[in-house]
Amino acid sequence: MSKKHVDLTQRRSICFVSETGRVEDPLQDPSVRYRCYHPAEALVAEGHDCTVVAAATFYENPLLKHDVYVFHRPNMARANFASVLAGLRKLGATLIADYDDLIFGDEELALVSSAVKNGTLTEEKAIVAFKSNLAGLRQFDKVTVSTEPLAARAREFNPDAQVCCAPNVIPESILSIQRANQTPFLKRSATNIGYFAGTRSHDKDFPIVEAALHRVLCENPHFNLLVVGPVVMPRSLAALPNVNTAPVVNFLRLPSLMSMCSSVIAPLEASKFNDCKSRVKFLEAAIGGCRLIASPIPDMQAIGEDRLTLATSTDDWYEALSAPLAPEARIELAKRNFAFLENTSYNDALKSLAGLK
């Protein structure tokens, strides 16, 4: 992709600082890809300079040369956090906090987080983490978030901040490859269903669709289910001959693996935490040319039912899974959804807050 010409007086330097555990290779963290690398790619294409760095590295040797700093999931517990922010403000830098999950708030919200429900954190540690993240949020007067419900939470806990919704997007570098390969339009069986879980955090979500899936797969032995990732498989499904599993794959291989499926599912347990989650599963399904059947979280509803299928009850899941799209209908859906990906921008909100437009 060619770089657009930008007047040198308008060119800005943007540093994305992420609280990621993947310190040596932040690109392997899905959250960092969507909230840092993807917007950085688009900004570079517009002529700006961008850097992505893990917070653990940044705070050891702060980079004080940039015009704009986007702190992805900032945490007050980070050593010299406050002093670094104070120094950047003194230099006149624009500081923005960015969130793609509800990781801040009171004890009630901490206890319904996926980290608690899946045992990643104890209740006590989750409460401490939410408190520390909340203190970090309150250090900023500019905030970007991935969904409107998350924006409402940010405004609730930091009412004086300017909060903008910057939805997750797929960058042109990925779109161009799938466009050239015609990935969304590859032929596949209409009865192939996929479930792609990148982390164990979905162990509590899969049971929502378990009964409907089991019934559909038993009634239709020619249907097939592919489960990819570390999610714990219920015994009722694991024992079926038309169920296959695979380990999590590199994100660059995900579209080709998804192109084996006609439908992809994204069940989510109803909770205040999940209400703030984003449309990532739709974006990934759209790259692969799959119909998405999903729980009706707000960000999925915002996509529109002309682009996906929402399932509220077991009966909804059963009916949707029992009625695969005809090949022609899936191709038309794939065209609409790929066009949606090509015309959605994260950076409008970010550029507005950063003074880049």
Image: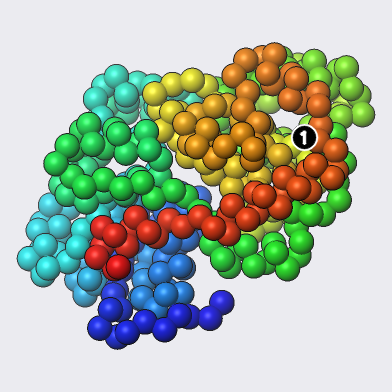
352 shown above or below 79: below
Name the one closer to the observer, 258 or 204. Answer: 258
Q: Is residue 235 left or right of residue 300?
A: right
Residue at (40, 27) in percent of width and height: 273
Q: Residue 188: horizontal and vertical position, in percent?
A: 85, 46
Residue at (37, 33) in percent of width and height: 149
Q: Residues within 10 Å of mark 1 (few under 14, many from 20)?
A: many
252 shown above or below 316: below
Q: Residue reaching furthest left?
A: 90
- Residue 238 can be seen in this image: no
Q: Is residue 235 left or right of residue 108?
A: right
When asked about the image quadrant of residue 163, the answer is top left
Specify the amino acid type for callout 1.
Ile
Q: Is residue 319 left or right of residue 67?
A: right
Look at the numbered disc 1 and give the secondary structure of its residue. strand
Residue located beneath label 1 in the image: 193
Look at the image and tell me in which quarter the N terminus lies: bottom right
- Residue 354 can be seen in this image: yes
Q: Residue 146: horizontal and vertical position, in percent?
A: 40, 44
Q: Is residue 223 left or right of residue 315?
A: right
When asked about the image quadrant of residue 124, the answer is top left
Residue at (75, 20) in percent of width and height: 319
326 shown above or below 58: above
Q: Residue 13: horizontal and vertical position, in percent?
A: 29, 74
Residue at (74, 25) in percent of width and height: 320
When asked about the image quadrant of residue 80, the answer is bottom left
Name the one closer to the observer, 111 or 239. Answer: 111
Q: Residue 236: horizontal and vertical position, in percent?
A: 76, 16
State how the image is colored.
rainbow
Look at the image and tell me in which quarter the C terminus lies: bottom left
